[in-house]
Image (cartoon, grey):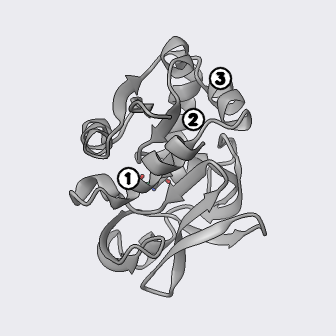
Amino acid sequence: MTTAPTIGVLALQGDVREHVRALRESGARPVAVRRPAELEAVDALVIPGGESTTMWKLADAFDLLEPLRLRVKSGMPAYGSCAGMIMLADRIEGGTDDQQTLGGIDMVVRRNAFGRQVDSFESTLDFAGRGAMRAVFIRAPWVESVGSGVEVLGLAEPGDRIVAVRQGPLLATSFHPELTGDTRVHSYFVEMVREH
Ligand SMILES: NC(=O)CC[C@H](N)C(=O)O
């Protein structure tokens, strides 16, 4: 792909503007996605943080849940941050009884996992071997376990928990890279989309 890839940002809740800015700085053409037709037009999608229990209901109300599942299943690159990570998990712990995800990454994600110790915090971690990075966690999940096809891209204190993973065209982080002005995670995703 030689031209800038068109990357959607799911705009139902969360830091849409910040993701748009980080994607633009990383060489992509970002667009907000709220409708099925907008989803169809993108090469890839970012799913921001928010509240995963609300996000799937909003996606359902906007007639996006099934189209999202289909596109993820058919191999569209997607990057989920925090609640977005939960949306990309095949299995979750600590969800509500009726909670649904899109799935796609063979992992178990525990909701509000760090939250039992502390609500929000910052940590420094190495993302995908690209050097030390400041990471912001807000009522963040962690990855409890991963299947053999999942690459672990980052661990965080406290507890050396898995907080960044990739499986094929799907990327997920427990933290919010859109809040620190460090575009390395978005650049990594844009590279994934270009190589796709
Ligand atoms: N900042 C976030 O996205 C928090 C995630 C939220 N705790 C959830 O379970 O969906």
Is 41 above or below relative to 92?
Answer: above
- Name the residue carrying label 1: 187
Looking at numbered disc 1 in the image, what kind of residue is underneath it?
A: Ser
- Name the residue carrying label 2: 56
Query: Residue 2 occupies which quadrant of the picture?
Result: top left
Q: Nearer the viewer, residue 30 or 13?
A: 30
Relative to 2, is 93 on the left or the right?
right
Q: What residue do we see at 44% from left, 46% from top?
A: 190
Alpha-carbon span between mark 3 and mark 2 = 12 Å
Q: What residue do we see at 35% from left, 31% from top?
A: 30
Of labels 3 and 2, earlier in sequence is 2
Q: Residues within 10 Å of mark 1 (few under 14, many from 20)?
A: some
Query: In front: mark 2 or mark 1?
Result: 1
Q: Nearer the viewer, residue 85 or 76?
A: 76
Q: How many marks?
A: 3
Is 191 above or below relative to 100?
Answer: below
Callout 1: SS:
helix
Looking at numbered disc 3 in the image, what kind of residue is underneath it?
A: Pro
Disc 3, disc 2: CB below 8 Å? Answer: no
Residue furthest toward the left?
A: 181
Alpha-carbon span between mark 2 and mark 1 = 27 Å
Q: What residue do we see at 65% from left, 23% from top?
A: 67
- Name the residue carrying label 3: 67
Is 110 above or below relative to 189?
Answer: below
Quadrant placement of the C terminus: top right
Q: Nearer the viewer, residue 93 or 85?
A: 85
Relative to 132, is 174 on the left or the right?
right
